[in-house]
Amino acid sequence: MGRGLSKPGAAMRKGGSFLLHVIIGHSQLEKIPMSIERQRKSLEEQLEEIMDGIAELKRNRGDNFSVKQLERTKKMVKSKLDKL
């Protein structure tokens, strides 16, 4: 085999090793173990983004339905944080 790629989606690296990209769904990603600290940081970042989204929607007189959805999501993320 020449210098071409032998695996779809793989990139040849120096030394002949391959760098392979794997695409998985979000639900499968959640199954990968993470430290408590990393989980907490991730949830806190999500919570901050949600609260920013709520504030922006309210500032721009956004759809009330969207605000209620974000409020429910905020409650769910807070619940996950409390369980850690």
Image (cartoon, helix red, strand yellow):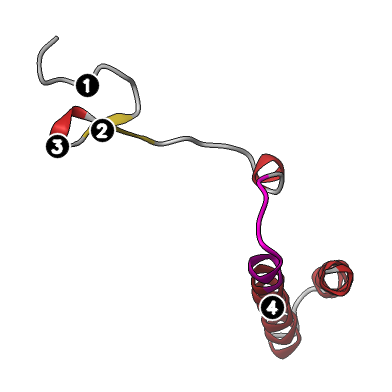
Residue 16 numbered mark, or none:
none
Figure check: 52 above or below 35:
below
Residue 14 numbered mark, or none:
3
Amino acid under disc 3: Lys
Q: What x and y, as percent, mark residue 58?
A: 76, 86
Dot 2 and dot 1 residues touching (CB under 8 Å)? yes
- Look at discs 4 and 2 and give the one toward the viewer: 2
The magenta segment is 32-40
- Label 2 element class: strand
Q: What x and y, as percent, mark residue 70?
A: 80, 71
**Crowding at mark 2 (Cα within 10 Å: few <14, some 14-19, many 20+):** some
- Look at discs 1 and 3 and give the one toward the viewer: 3
Q: Is residue 13 left or right of residue 31?
A: left
Sequence order check: which comes first, mark 1 or mark 4?
1
Question: Along the line of sight, which residue is nearer the eye, 37 or 72?
Answer: 37
Q: Quadrant of the N terminus?
A: top left
Distance from label 4 to label 2 (Cα)? 38 Å
Residue found 63% across the figure and 67% down from its top: 38
Amino acid under disc 4: Gly
Figure check: 23 above or below 74:
above
Residue found 31% across the figure and 29% down from its top: 10
- Label 1 element class: loop
Question: Along the line of sight, which residue is nearer the eye, 30 or 37?
Answer: 37
**Crowding at mark 1 (Cα within 10 Å: few <14, some 14-19, many 20+):** few
Q: Is residue 6 left or right of residue 60?
A: left
Residue 36 forms part of the magenta stretch: yes
Question: Along the line of sight, which residue is nearer the eye, 54 or 47?
Answer: 47
Sequence order check: which comes first, mark 4 or mark 2?
2
